[in-house]
Image (tube, rainbow, N blue to C red):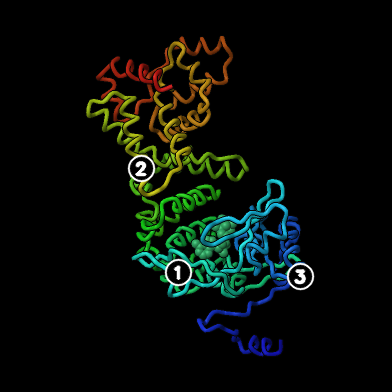
Amino acid sequence: MIKKYIRKILGINKTDAAGNNMEPDTLSPKQHGIDPVLLSNNAIRVTKTLQDAGFKAYVVGGAVRDLLLGVKPKDFDIATNATPEQVKRLFRRAFIIGKRFQIVHVMFGQDLLEVTTFRGPASGESPKDEHGRVLRDNTFGQHHEDAVRRDFTINAMYYDPATQTVLDFHGGMADIRKKILRIIGIPEARFREDPVRMLRAVRFAARLQFTIDPATAAPIAVMAPLINNVPSARVFDEMLKLLLSGQALACLKRLRSEGLHHGLLPLLDVVLEQPMGEKFITLALAATDERVKLGKPVSPGFLFASLLWHQVLEKWTAYQAAGENPIPALHLAADDVLDTQSDKLAIQRKIGSDMRDIWAMQPRFERRIGKSPYKLLEHPRLRASYDFLLLRCASGEIDAEIGAWWTSFMAADGNEREVLLTAKPRNAATPAGAAKRGASRGGRGRKKIGGSTESAQ
Ligand code: ATP
Ligand code: MG
């Protein structure tokens, strides 16, 4: 205690052989200001059970960061020195997950808490790919080692609900106060070990409105292409987190302002370069952010369908220009875009099929005659596809009249619908480039749209 006090006065902390801080700053409630009301009862239950059994246990990571920022965490991760087997024995509904590094899912009703045993640092012997990405580092470790292998200083703090103290190994509290996102350790090395940390840096900075520390930000532009070596399923998960953060638009703006959207987010390279595509995506993400903020569900299928629409549109137009009929051309375009993307991002099958449905519905909104609009009303994807249609109108891609017509048609009763149908709506939904060509082909294109649409149901 006295030694620690002297070290503190002298400004030196005890470090291990690798130079990592071994003794954290201990912050009292007065110093950290966490409101205990924001803590979940289940998080308290898990830490208490572990502590009563003689183990160390803390709330860790994003939850502590959010608590310090006065935000109610959306989930709680727990770090402990108990092994997964020891954790599992203490809870009625606990499941060991993962093959290489095992963690425990503790369930209380629908609430899931992730309990992780302290991890050791990535050692020189950890297997790596040819670019230096660590493939496995699954050793258990000491508390201070667990802190050093976390990504950012603000994500490496531990909260003990019993004593209401925060343990801070890397100056996270000071960075929270200064609103700085700083990686722990040498930035180049940490990004090389795991390039996904670059995406995380942008996501946290945008979401929390923090500045990325210059030393942390500097290597990102050069190292961004390393993302391409990360398994696509992981990039997809991280992208989804970014897009569902409630600050998707801010995240993308940040990526662009840092010159990061090249390589870092392959699917956006092309789209953001076109003014029309940019407008469409901006509107789509603003709508998504709004839904997230209101706590409404957001469909990943809708989100990715929006992000990739202008790529589909370009190919759709090209296939039609090459003589393909509109509906088969749209399906070919969708196949092309989904195939290309699946190399980079493992879009899950269900999400891919949602995207395809939303795209395939678009030409059907054009057919405002006979029974077609009524059939569309019964389609399970109507709502998402209609929202998508409205985005196309708002971005200037198609005539706003068609969106307004559908808004009226959906809200109308039987008689009003008949009136709307006989009011002879204009043909307005063909993609910009194809519209002129479509017009010169007259009825031929329209007939085919109808024909193929029936078979696509
Ligand atoms: P969110 O609120 O978005 O969930 P989070 O910080 O909780 O943010 P998670 O992905 O849930 O993010 O990760 C939990 C914690 O695990 C992080 O706070 C960080 O300490 C650690 N962590 C996650 N991913 C990495 C990584 N790639 N490298 C190092 N540490 C990581
Ligand atoms: Mg989290």
Percent x, y for residue 95? Answer: 63, 54
Answer with left or right where residue 446 lies relative to residue 422: left
Element marked by disc 3: loop
Determine the residue positioned at 36% across, 50% down.
266
Total residue callouts: 3
- Determine whether the beta carbon of the residue marked 1 sits less than 8 angstroms from the nearest atom of ligand 1: yes
- Image quadrant where one finds the N terminus: bottom right
Residue at mark 3:
163
User: Callout 3, which amino acid?
Assistant: Thr
Disc 1 secondary structure class: helix
- The residue beneath circle 2 is 275
Mark found first going from the N terminus, 1 or 2: 1
Do the residues under discs 1 and 2 have CB atoms within 8 angstroms?
Answer: no
**Distance between the alpha carbons at the discs numbered 1 and 3:** 32 Å
Of the two numbered discs 2 and 3 on the same chain, state the one appearing first in sequence.
3
Q: Is residue 4 left or right of residue 365?
A: right
Q: Secondary structure at mark 2?
A: helix
**In front: 347, or 263?**
347
Q: Looking at mark 2, is its residue's CB closer than 8 Å to ligand 1?
A: no
Q: Earlier in the sequence, mark 1 or mark 3?
A: 3
Residue 305 can be seen, yes or no = yes
Look at label 1 and name its amino acid: Arg
Q: Which residue is mark 1?
A: 190
The answer to whether any part of residue 211 appears in the image is no
